[in-house]
Image (tube, helix red, strand yellow):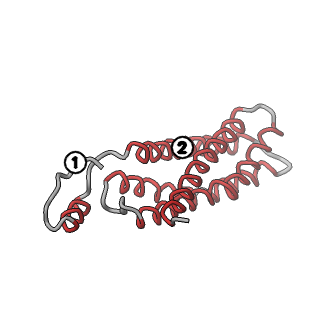
Amino acid sequence: MNLRKLTLTLHVVASVGWIGAVASFLALAVTGFVSPEIELVRASYIAMDLTYRWVVIPLGLASLVSGLVSSLITEWGLFRYYWVLVKILMTIPAVVLMLVHMQQVGYLAGTVAAAVFSSAETTGLRAQLIAYACAAWLVLLAATVLSMYKPRGRTPFGGRRLQQRNGGEGLPAQQAI
């Protein structure tokens, strides 16, 4: 099997899965925040913790790694086109923030699992998780749009590489891909 196609397939599967997992996480966060039923609140946050640790994080890491590998072994390159660079610059902070917030998700799941639980003590954190999930979902959708539309425009590095490949004959930076 072609390595380029394999990494691209892994990247698409991981990225689409990551978007779906974040959407599920968001649904659980909203349910846990608005539900008046304490058992549903508990179940939502415990499910969020499991989903986050075993689905969201692995898919996010797989998306980042497969995206980096895919960009390095294809004609798109890592620094040749602005759309690839923007995707990487959106994905790296998203993965870092995802890893940083893992502790908060675990804390909330542990708190609601306790025998005595007051929703007032975690209201701010619960609302914060909804905001983070919404922001993450929007970033992932933006990365998907960039992948699909591939806006034109080479980086200065990409323009120089194209000139070198064409024996010094420059092509316009906005040439069709």
Q: Amino acid at mark 1?
A: Gln
Q: Is residue 88 visible?
A: yes
- Mark in the foreground, 2 or 1: 1
- Looking at the rendered image, the quarter that the N terminus falls into is bottom right
157 sits left or right of 108 in the view = left
Residue found 66% across the figure and 45% down from its top: 25
Q: Amino acid at mark 2?
A: Trp
168 sits left or right of 98 in the view = left
Where is 165 relative to 112, above or below?
below
Q: Which residue is mark 2?
A: 137
Figure quadrant of residue 162: bottom left
**Residue 116 locus on image (x, y percent):** 83, 47
Residue found 24% across the figure and 65% down from its top: 161
Where is 10 relative to 125, above or below?
below
SS of the residue at dot 1?
loop
Q: Which residue is mark 1?
A: 174
SS of the residue at dot 2?
helix
Where is 4 relative to 109, above or below?
below
Contact (CB < 8 A) between labels 2 and 1?
no
